[in-house]
Amino acid sequence: MTDEPRIALERVSRWYGNVVAVNDISFALRPGVTGLLGPNGAGKTTLLHMLAGLLRPSSGTVRIAGEIAWRNPSIYRSIGLVPEREAVHSFLTGREFARLAAQLQRLPDPDGAAARAIATVELEGAADRPIGTYSKGMRQRAKIAAALVHEPSILLLDEPFNGMDPRQRIHMMALLREMSAAGRTILFSSHILEEVERLADGVLVIVAGRLAAAGDFREIRRLMTDRPHTFVVRSSDDRRLAAAFLAEPAVFGAELHDGRLAVQVAEFGGFTRAVARVARDTGVTLFEVAPTDDSLESVFAYLVSRR
């Protein structure tokens, strides 16, 4: 495998008249799972459609597997796209829909490829029923089967978990992790932050068409030193520990509540470096030290609020 990114955007923008949907975005993705986050209207779907070669960038360059995406049918050998919209013919069965995708890819054994894709998404029991009789979660799985039928190295998934029940979500997350471990590059959008937090190796946060943040969400959170952080601490003597913490430059508040100590800090790293030393110096035993806001939701809310 080369070190060349599977997906590469360089200063990409897309506008519709006076409306800017995507504004000067650059990033590169290699094998792994990346979550694409942003509020409604942020530009996530526009971005995915440009990656799939369905939209021409107004400026900048979009490359898939080293090739320009726009008006380049050869990229469809490398990518599988699951759009958010219901782009499924209701009169086709799940098996026929997957086989049609295999035939469009000119696979030598479309029936075998369709059967493997149907089995991969656990749709065998309903494979010969018309898609019009499927639930929303089943239609999602049919779309994913069609995207996987040619075993692409890149998957672009727009809200792939919509309509799936908890068991289906767990299975799909496990499947995507397996594909990532096998060397695939997966980019998926989701408005359910817990799903991204549980599945993605990294995140791209799009706000008002701009790339607000990129990387591991915990690392992004730790870099936000201009926002207070809150830690919950349990110890052998919370009151004594609270008094000692208040003498630390990184701490600006401490409150005892319901048997726990809540510590407000101005600098994440400064506090984490000091906490063990302070406990040792005061002779207090630590039982728990945990940030209360170290979640993807807090990162996302913070980034949106900055715009």
Image (cartoon, grey):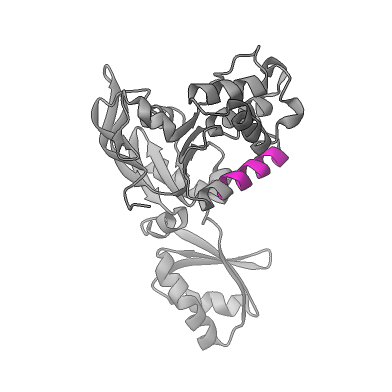
Q: Where on the picture, by quarter, is residue 70? A: top left
Q: Is residue 176 magenta?
A: yes
Q: Where on the picture, by quarter, is residue 73? A: top left
Q: Is residue 153 magenta?
A: no
Question: Does the rendering let one see residue 42?
Answer: no
Residue at 26% from the left image edge and 19% from the top image edge: 18
Left or right of residue 264: residue 89 = right
Left or right of residue 155: residue 145 = right
Residue at 46% from the left image edge and 41% from the top image edge: 153
Between 267 and 137, the residue placed more toward the observer is: 137
Question: Does the rendering let one see residue 169?
Answer: yes
- Which residue is farthest right? 125
Left or right of residue 175: residue 4 = left
Q: Where on the picture, by quarter, is residue 59? A: top left
Residue at 46% from the left image edge and 57% from the top image edge: 218
Q: Predominant secondary structure in magenta?
A: helix
Between 88 and 165, the residue placed more toward the observer is: 88
Q: Give the magenta part as a residue range.
A: 166-177
Q: How many marks?
A: 0
Q: Position of residue 38 (x, y in %)?
A: 44, 36
The quarter in which the C terminus is drawn is: top left
Q: Position of residue 295 (x, y in %)?
A: 53, 53
Relative height, residue 223 to residue 282 (above, below): above
Q: Position of residue 282 (x, y in %)?
A: 54, 86
Q: Position of residue 301 (x, y in %)?
A: 46, 44
- Which residue is farthest front? 108
Residue at 68% from the left image edge and 36% from the top image edge: 119
